[in-house]
Image (cartoon, rainbow, N blue to C red):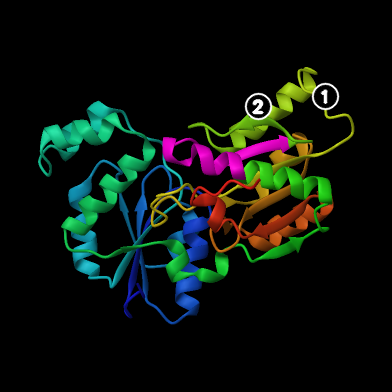
Amino acid sequence: MAVPPGPVAIIAGGGGFPLEIAEAARACGRDVSIVALKGFAHRGLKRFPLVWADMLDPARILDTLRAVAPAAVVLAGSVTRPGPGAITSIFSAYRNRDHIAKVLAGGDDRILRGVVQFIEEAGFHVVGAHEIAPALLAPLGAFAGREPTPAERADVERGLALLAATGPYDVGQGVVVSSGRVLAVEGPEGTDAMLERVAGLIRRRRVVLDGAAAVLVKVPKRGQDTRVDLPAIGPRTVERGRAARIGAIAVAAAGVVVIERATTVAAARDAGIALVGVKAGDFVEGHVPS
């Protein structure tokens, strides 16, 4: 569905990604307003019309959106998940408690979908960052450093097959593979922590790569709501990947955001890491290569 013309409101968490979206939207001629979440949002967002709001103050967030009357709302940036008690006490005025308990009993996917539903029930149109700023998505093919080797491409296929199999179980979006062996699967801790785990295994010689670099594969999960949980890589991914002996990072073309692209590409080239966008659609839908 095309994003309707008009102003955009960004509910901004931490990191530089919300600022990149805001700048891209402004470059496309859209007016941009920011609802900056206290304790998370980047100070650089001050160059846009901005209102600070507490993450657990939905009334202020909705009042700000009503004042802006945006054509679309984007949720972007990192936040720390509050405890169930805090969420229940705040949102009890807006939702049935039984519904909240059901949402909180699920994984992060269910909670994120609940946030989208809450905003849309208030009359706003929630869209993905990629719908406002498609240029932030990874392209198809190698876009930094060298081309992956045949061995690395084989490991990428194995990683894609594994992610296709685990996707329905709300496991993470990433996997590390080396010489056909799966070294780590991303869990709730996220990609960076998974890479730190692999680096620790290498340091303690629990994993020996025998000179062969590993690959990181990252794609959206099947059924993932990309409006609020679009996978992303950035400079920190490359930095952690270097420590984990990653030789290639393969991501779903048009399905993963490349944050701070110029910095990420430069870091990958410096580290000798290949960045490549792959056609992951068939794998994400459950196809496993023979």
Q: Position of residue 9 (x, y in %)?
A: 33, 65
Screen quadrant of the N terminus: bottom left
Instruction: Locate residue 240 relative to residue 282 in the image: left or right.
Output: right
Query: In the rendering, which numbered label is found on residue 197?
Result: 2
Task: Based on the picture, tell me whether residue 175 belongs to the magenta stretch.
Answer: yes
From the image, tell me which residue sits under label 1. 208
Between 172 and 75, the residue placed more toward the observer is: 172
Q: Amino acid at mark 2?
A: Arg
Q: Residues within 10 Å of mark 2 (few under 14, many from 20)?
A: some
User: What percent of the width, then of the height, locates residue 173?
Assistant: 53, 42
Residue name at image x 12 percent, y 37 percent? 92
- Whether residue 66 is situated above or below residue 178 in the rendered picture: below
Which residues are drawn in magenta? 161-177
224 shown above or below 279: above
- The image's mark for residue 66 is none
Q: Is residue 32 left or right of residue 159?
A: left
Q: Residues within 10 Å of mark 1 (few under 14, many from 20)?
A: few
Q: Give me the C-alpha separation between circle 2 and circle 1.
A: 14 Å
Q: If the image is split into quadrants, where does the C terminus sit?
A: top right
Q: Residue at x 46, y 45 (%)?
A: 78
Of residue 53 and residue 109, the one placed in the foreground of this image is 109
Answer whether residue 173 is visible to the viewer in this image.
Answer: no
Q: Secondary structure at mark 1?
A: loop
